[in-house]
Amino acid sequence: MSKVIHLTRHAQAEHNVNEDYDILDAPLTPLGRHQAEELFTKTGDLQASADLLVSSPLKRTLQTTIIGYRGLRARLESQEPPKPLIVLSRLQEVNDFPCDTGSSRHELEQIDEFKNINFDSLEDDWNSKSGDFSPSPDVVEARARWVRRWLRNRPEQNIVVVAHGDILRRIVKAPYSQAWANAEVRRYTFAGEDGKDNDEANLILLPGGTEARVGEQEPTSSDWQI
């Protein structure tokens, strides 16, 4: 069975409104929360079948995950042994605008909405936008490759990922392709024999690749720079 990766862009966040990229770690808007609810209703099969849930640590992706994939999360965390949500720092957005810069682990742990999320995996410098998290194109390319390899090497065969428009385009190696809409899910698999013969771990879009789409194609911060 070929591994399937369900790549999801977060719902509408505050920085998507009027393209205001100065909002630190921009959370979802009320419309974004509604979009996440719609995402939940449109992904019933996925909620019942996926066997791993992974999210970027930024507020908007975490909120999209806990609202939009709450059925999947509840099912995975209630099984034996439990399989909790994985918060993966390398899924953070590409640029170093305030909106794309995450909050510290301590700050995230103080937010009631996130009380049941384990942030132990977050590095101390995960939101520094330096080193492995720099917006430098070479670093971003390496980070996207790391994510692909990490996904390929996981034992699960049906993985949901919640991330951001720009890093998603880098993960699928199409940085100037049509952006994901807010709360859009696309299905990919690894090229070749699960990509195991390829250090790049390339992903290919499956036929009928868009599984769900709720919002509009709000621009990313990279779109704004072009």
Image: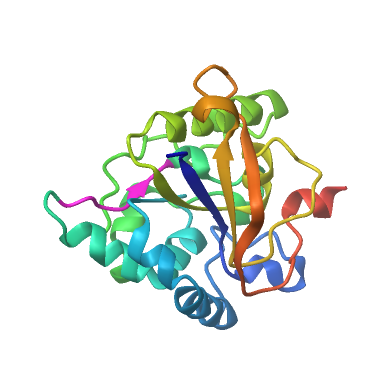
Q: Residue furthest front?
A: 1
- Image x and y of residue 208, in percent: 66, 58
- Image x and y of residue 99, in percent: 61, 56
Judged left or right of residue 183, residue 19 is right
Considering depth in this image, is 22 or 118 the residue closer to the camera?
118
At x 51% / y 43%, what residue is drawn? 91
> How is the model colour-coded?
rainbow
Considering depth in this image, is 86 or 26 the residue closer to the camera?
86
* Rendering quarter of residue 216: bottom right
Quadrant including the N terminus: top left
At x 25% / y 51%, what residue is drawn? 118
- Image x and y of residue 92, in percent: 53, 45
Write the start and end of the magenta stretch as one range.
82-88
Judged left or right of residue 155, residue 184 is right
- Res 131 visible: no
Chief secondary structure of the magenta portion: loop
- Image x and y of residue 17, in percent: 71, 73
Q: Residue furthest left?
A: 80
Q: Eyeballing the image, is 41 above or below 164?
A: below
Considering depth in this image, is 73 or 61 the residue closer to the camera?
73
Judged left or right of residue 218, residue 35 is left
- Res 118 visible: yes
Q: Is residue 134 magenta?
A: no
At x 47% / y 70%, what residue is drawn? 43
At x 49% / y 45%, what residue is drawn? 4
Q: Eyeballing the image, is 40 above or below 82?
A: below
Q: What is the count of numbered marks?
A: 0
Q: Eyeballing the image, is 150 above or below 37?
A: above
* Rendering quarter of residue 135: top right
